[in-house]
Amino acid sequence: MSLDPGIHASLETAGARRKRHHNRHEQPESRPIFWLEALYRAPHHRSAVHPHNQIHLLQGTHSSADSTIDDELPLFGRHTDDFRAMGIQVAVSSERTGLLCNDKYATAQFLLDRSIPFARTWLPAELDIPRLQYPLFLKPRSGRGSVGAFTINTERELRFFLEYVPNPIVQEFLSGREFTIDLLADFHGKVISVVPRERMVVRSGVTDRGKTVQHSGMIQLAIRTAEALDIRGQPIFRLSWRMRSQRSLK
């Protein structure tokens, strides 16, 4: 596999060939693995031996580790002390934060209790269906990639999808332009970078094309949210915000 000479030179300058990375998600044909010193495969994150296997793989490497799959963040958060004992810094928030952020209903209640703006969110048992106003938004209580997420326009649709989607939650529908905020905090929870961007093209919940914007309100809200959740390490915290007009960006 060949790369553009400019890209090749940049990778060499950055020491890409010398970087040791442990990624169990890469496919054999994936381009990044051609620029790694070592590639190790580990069991699925739901396997009982997963964290111990990861610790074994990293022993003696004196490296750092990161996890990018939502489901395994709490697991890595639980074992940060085990990694630290080997001199390995894991870029992950605590297990408590990981579990909270993987529960959309718990996240909503947590932030609303701290006066941080968030879409109103209900469990099925909390709904007063005859008095609801549409549209609404329904999705699984846990999950990612917009899987099982639906806009609800009528009571009939609501009743159907409450049965169709496993463990659902219902939220108020936020119309307008959508923005994502990429946030990075250090290992002590100090926010060091906040980059808002408008989601121009979205596929399966992931932004294919975006445009960065400068908006102090979004940045401050992201910092408040990250500090409340005690976000730290390398995982990027994304906050969606829907704006109703171009004027509100000024």
Image (cartoon, rainbow, N blue to C red):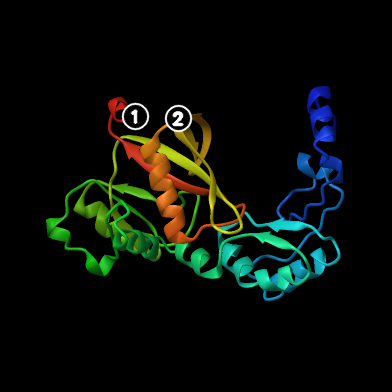
Q: Is mark 2 on a helix, strand or loop?
A: loop
The answer to which of marks 2 and 1 sits earlier in the sequence is 2
Q: Is mark 1 on a helix, strand or loop?
A: helix
In the image, residue 22 sits, relative to residue 221, either above or below, namely below
Please state which amino acid type lies under the numbered disc 1: Leu
Q: Residues within 10 Å of mark 2 (few under 14, many from 20)?
A: some
Q: Mark 2 points at which residue?
A: 213
Identify the residue at image location x=73%, y=49%. Answer: 26
Residue 249 bears which disc, if any? 1
Is there CB contact under 8 Å for labels 2 and 1?
yes
The picture places residue 73, in percent across and down from the top left corner, at 59, 62
The picture places residue 165, in percent across and down from the top left corner, at 38, 60
Identify the residue at image location x=46%, y=54%. Answer: 226
| Horizontal side, residue 243 vs residue 187: left or right | left
Q: Residues within 10 Å of mark 1 (few under 14, many from 20)?
A: few
Identify the residue at image location x=67%, y=72%. Answer: 81
- For this orientation, the residue located farthest to the left is 131
Q: Distance between the residues labelled 2 and 1?
A: 9 Å
Q: Quadrant of the N terminus?
A: top right
